[in-house]
Image (tube, grey):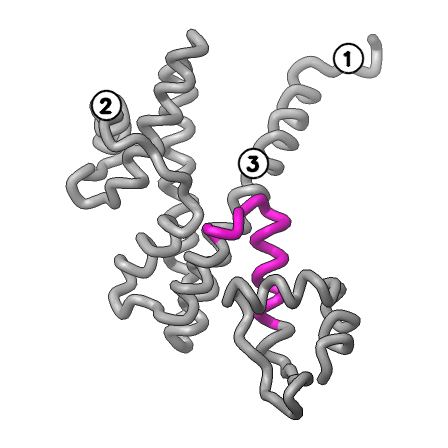
Amino acid sequence: MRISELATRTGVPVATIKYYLREKLLPEGERTSPTQASYGTEHAQRLGVIRALVDAGVGIAGVRKVIGVLEQPPENPYDLLGAANAAVTPAVAADIDLTAATALLERMGGDAGKCFPDQVAAVAQALAALDRAGFAVPERVMDAYLSHLSAIAEAELAATPDTSIEDAVRYVVLGTALVEPLILALRRVAEQVAASRRFAPGPSD
């Protein structure tokens, strides 16, 4: 299909597609003439991935990292998970204090030495932001966070496809980038549901 047909099929404007081509996020089409190229299903699928990441708030630099993982996936599943997370994790100051973050990891039964440094630093940065705001997560609430997030992680890893490395890469990378907004949205809805049960007036009120 021509680039105009690709744009119609995917809903991505031609100008945007050309930008992705220039940025090497989208592979070149097959040349049919000096000024035209033909695009296939793989281009439409790649555009779907790119747009989903952009819509989820991932910047172009992050998208480029994700595409890199998709094109050259690590063979080791643990390294794959780390690469997927790193692709969508903002940079954190190298000198940040990791003490509180390490303590939380230990409460989850983890070992900071076996975790990817960027992820531990991201936890530390989030904790530091809470501290600057003078807000402390109550211990019973933090326990709930750690317990339920551990269960989510176990369920997600158990569901990773074993049909092919490509399927596993797509699941891990896109699941990392695109599911977090869903989890955040569901958390807010769950709070509304819980609040309605706790505070909503009964029939006699």
- Element marked by disc 2: loop
Task: Give the alpha-carbon distance from disc 2 to disc 3, as whole Å.
Answer: 26 Å
Query: Chief secondary structure of the magenta span?
Result: helix
State yes or no: discs 2 and 3 in contact (Cβ < 8 Å).
Answer: no
Residue of label 1: 201
- Element marked by disc 3: helix
Say which mark, if any, is on residue 97.
2
Residue of label 3: 184
Task: Give the alpha-carbon distance from disc 1 to disc 2, as whole Å.
Answer: 46 Å
Q: How crowded is the residue under tag 2: few (<14 C-alpha within 10 Å), some, or many (20+)? A: few
State the extent of the magenta-drawn residues as a range. Answer: 45-62
The amino acid type of the residue labelled 2 equals Asp
What residue is at 53 percent from the left and 47 percent from the top?
Answer: 58
Task: Give the alpha-carbon distance from disc 3 to disc 1, as whole Å.
Answer: 27 Å
What residue is at 32 percent from the left and 60 percent from the top?
Answer: 80
Q: In which quarter of the image is the C terminus?
A: top right
Q: How crowded is the residue under tag 3: few (<14 C-alpha within 10 Å), some, or many (20+)? A: few
